[in-house]
Amino acid sequence: MVRPLGAALLAVLVTACRPAAPRLSLLFLGRSPAANLGGLTWAPDPDSSRIVAFDGALRIARSFTSPRLATPLAVAPLRTDLLVSERTGEGVVFDTGGHVLREWDSPDPVDVYAAAGTDRVVSARSPYDVQFVAQPDTAALLRILDTLGRASGRIGPGRVPAVPFLVQLVNAGAVATDRGGAVYFAPLASDAIVKYDASGALRWTATRKRFAAETDPVFLPPRGRVIEARYAVVNVALALGPDGRLYAVGGSDSAATKLRLDVLDTASGKILETRALGPRETAIAVTAEGGIETFDAETLLAHAGSGRREMFGPPFALPDLHGDTVRLAQLEGKVSLINFWASWCDPCREEFPHMAQLYSEFPRGDFAIAAISDDVDRGKMMDFARRFGPPFPILVGGGRMKQLYHYRGLPYSVLLDRHGRIIERIFGFGGAEEFTSLPATIAQEVFFF
């Protein structure tokens, strides 16, 4: 069929005149701040232990994982690299290919980090994992670090609560910084957002006037070994948008079961806009002009896929309890769960019976488990093995495994396909629910690949 020329030209003109969709920068994925770097926005996906990069249409451009990514909770640009804050407080620097460049331990019990593409890193006590640990009265509110994680300066004195063990809680909060060196801090449990200039001088304090009178956090009566405190969750995360405004995510109610977004002018601290967030508005993006758009984070991440599988390594050759050497190569052709554990690890004790049940559900020719002990004390390892009597092989790591495989903590497991490639990493013990879903993943590999 020949299309009339006039109609064809009209269609071209209509298409050409249609405005292009605005380019979006992701600010927050869930309650975690993202980083704008290299034309992409990089966000942590803590549930899948990975970093995901989105393009300007919020399509998945790439993603990566690593043994160093147990629960990543914030990403910031550090020069041309990515600075990731782990839930446990470590700072880990990756290049955009997902290669680890360096990492450092938390200056406080648990810290979160901000950077703006320069050499200046700011650390604050993390709002994601508060520890009840006392600190000296002279401890800084915020620390300035270099690109190796070494302290090079400080900002402000921390608050000193009446109960010393609440010092982490009253000084925890979200942090952001800009290329000019200004630092923005929003306390977790206090209705304030503050700006410090590059010298550390306080420039302004903003408040939402949520409370007629604020009260300090207090400890609740103990319940067995569980220690809890009562406090209002006010601020959760901060980010600077491409429009130069400051965006703050905080609680609309005291427990932060409902969230709100506040937009602030960075020059004056004036709150320009406030928006209540619905239960599915869990990802927040902005245009270059400050137009706000919200999305469901799970929907965005559903398009991430699993990506290309990487080989597990380095290969091991370790003795079992009888002194026979077991090599990684011997597991080729089977779907395998490589589990790292230690006798002193309480979650490992809880996990072993579930692994034994999992081991019994598949034929030996299709599925294997290799449980590698990272105990230094062989006697304690043997006592553990005798107590649980696992049906799968126990291998002796001799306390050297963390240095080789760089995992964050124990237990740590890696599920491998028949070719020794990583299907998924499992950090910690996720309870019975984890072992309810894991058989389906293994069955998919065993019977369909």
Image (cartoon, rainbow, N blue to C red):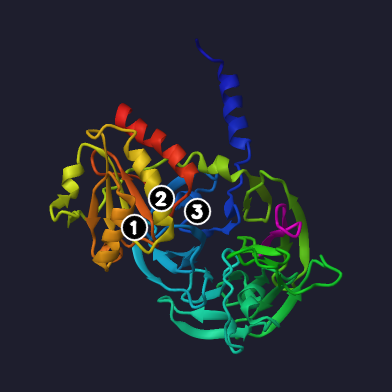
Give yes or no for contact between labels 2 and 1 (Cβ–Cβ under 8 Å).
yes
Earlier along the polypeptide chain: callout 1 or callout 3? 3
At label 3, the amino acid type is: Pro
Quick check: 222 left or right of 46? right
Quick check: 187 left or right of 2? right
Q: Position of residue 311 (x, y in %)?
A: 26, 48
Q: Position of residue 57 (x, y in %)?
A: 55, 44
Residue 352 inside the magenta-drawn segment: no
Outermost residue toward the bottom in this view:
138
Q: Residue at x 58, y 85 (%)?
A: 139
Q: Quadrant of residue 266?
A: bottom right
Tag of residue 351: 2
Measure the alpha-carbon separation of dots 2 and 3: 21 Å
At label 1, the amino acid type is: Trp
Q: Nearer the viewer, residue 182 or 2?
A: 182
Quadrant location of the C terminus in the rendered image: top left
Q: Residue at x 25, y 52 (%)?
A: 394
- Density class for disc 2 (Cα within 10 Å; few <14, some 14-19, many ≥20) is some
Quick check: 66 left or right of 311? right
Q: Which residue is mark 1?
A: 341
Vertical arrangement, residue 197 with respect to residue 217, above or below? below
Give the residues in magenta.
245-261
Vertical arrangement, residue 74 with respect to residue 111, above or below? above
**Residue 425 shows in the view:** no
Outermost residue toward the right in this view:
212
At label 2, the amino acid type is: Glu
Q: Position of residue 385 (x, y in %)?
A: 29, 55
Q: Which residue is mark 3?
A: 46
Residue 252 inside the magenta-drawn segment: yes
Q: Nearer the viewer, mark 1 or mark 3?
A: 1
Q: Nearer the viewer, residue 142 or 327?
A: 327
Earlier along the polypeptide chain: callout 2 or callout 1? 1
